[in-house]
Amino acid sequence: EKYVQSWLPVHQIYQGNCFPEGTDPTVEGFDPLAAVLKYYNLEFGRDNLDFDISEDKKNFAEWRGQATKNA
């Protein structure tokens, strides 16, 4: 009963509530994964890489360098 009203992302994805507005899942060739990634503003190939080769690692290293230069 407690979770009947909860917004659980996986359930919402399966119910079709995590697609960008105007998306028609009945169109032939519809790719639900691509639609969900677009809804969450995830850029495939950029936001899902291993940390060692990620943009985050580069940014953290740059920020750390800036922080250690400030006295």
Image (tube, rainbow, N blue to C red):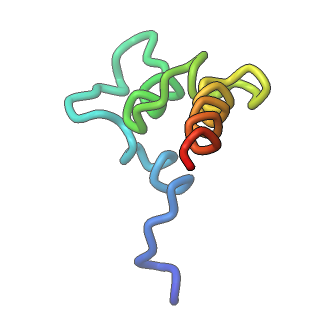
Residue placed at 20% from the left, 29% from the top?
A: 22
Q: Nearer the viewer, residue 15 or 33?
A: 33
Residue placed at 52% from the left, 56% from the top?
A: 11
Q: Nearer the viewer, residue 19 or 59?
A: 59
Q: Nearer the viewer, residue 61 or 19?
A: 61
Residue placed at 60% from the left, 29% from the top?
A: 62
**Does residue 63 sit above or below 26 in this rendering?**
below
Task: Pick out the residue farthest to the front.
Answer: 71
Horizontal and vertical percent position of residue 2:
51, 88
Q: Nearer the viewer, residue 68 or 3?
A: 68
Left or right side of 45 for 20 = left
Quarter of the image for residue 28 reads top left
Task: Pick out the residue farthest to the bottom.
Answer: 1
Residue placed at 49% from the left, 22% from the top?
A: 43
Horizontal and vertical percent position of residue 63:
57, 37
Left or right side of 37 for 71 = right
Horizontal and vertical percent position of residue 32:
49, 27
**Does residue 10 sit above or below 64 in this rendering?**
below
Tell how many labels.
Answer: 0
Task: Pick out the residue farthest to the left.
Answer: 22
Left or right side of 62 for 23 = left
Horizontal and vertical percent position of residue 59:
58, 30
